[in-house]
Image (cartoon, rainbow, N blue to C red):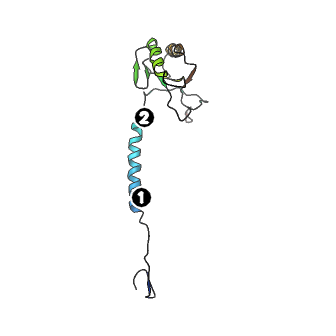
Amino acid sequence: MEVGQRNGTSRSTLSAINVTPLVDVMLVLLIIFMVTAPMLEQGVEVNLPEVSDAPGLQAGKEPLIVTVEQNGAISIGKQSIPGPEKLVPVLLEILQSRQEKEVFLQADRDVPYGKVVQVMAAIKGAGIEKLGMVSMPPDPEK
């Protein structure tokens, strides 16, 4: 008796979906995304301070982040700024086209406090009223 034949009179096909190729494709895509995800990280690597109650950034808009590295170098995104005095004209130029006039300051925890205050003063000098500080949540293992 053939597959799909009943009592020799009617013939119907047995249909089943083969999911093996689908699983193979999904595993390949998973591996590709796992490899490329770390490459999508932007900005400069800094050692952020830990704060227990850090509000998150609002989703849906690209924030303007000013970074102060451990060696005191200042940057906006990947653009390096020579010093706090040169920060004001650059911020004014960037914020001309933005509706929201807010900036986030991301400073390494080992940067001297005076340097961070200089950068904050320069940001305020550019007319920025909303200045947020970027921090990391504390490590529960410590």
Labelled disc at residue 23: 1
- Count of numbered circles on the image: 2
Place of residue 120 in the rendered image (x, y in percent of width and height, measured from the top left)? 53, 16
Place of residue 71 in the rendered image (x, y in percent of width and height, measured from the top left)? 42, 18
Point 44% across, 79% down: residue: 12
Place of residue 104 in the rendered image (x, y in percent of width and height, measured from the top left)? 52, 24
Disc 2 residue type (three-letter): Glu
Point 46% across, 88% down: residue: 7
Point 41% across, 58% down: residue: 23
Which residue in the structure is indicated by mark 2? 41
Give the camera-side residue of 37 and 65: 65
Give the camera-side residue of 20 and 138: 20
69 vs 59: above or below = above
Q: Residues within 10 Å of mark 2 (few under 14, many from 20)?
A: few
Residue 135 shown left or right of residue 20 in the figure:
right
Query: Does dot 1 land on a helix, a strand or a loop?
Result: helix
Query: Does dot 2 land on a helix, a strand or a loop?
Result: loop
Q: Residues within 10 Å of mark 1 (few under 14, many from 20)?
A: few
Give the camera-side residue of 53 and 127: 127
Mark with earlier residue (1, 2): 1
Disc 1 residue type (three-letter): Val
- Quadrant location of residue 133? top right
Give the camera-side residue of 7 and 139: 7
Point 42% across, 32% down: residue: 42
Labelled disc at residue 136: none
Label 1 and label 2: CA atoms lie apart by 28 Å
Disc 1 + disc 2, Cβ < 8 Å: no
- Quadrant location of residue 131? top right
Place of residue 132 in the rendered image (x, y in percent of width and height, measured from the top left)? 56, 24
Quarter of the figure with the N terminus: bottom left
50 vs 113: above or below = below
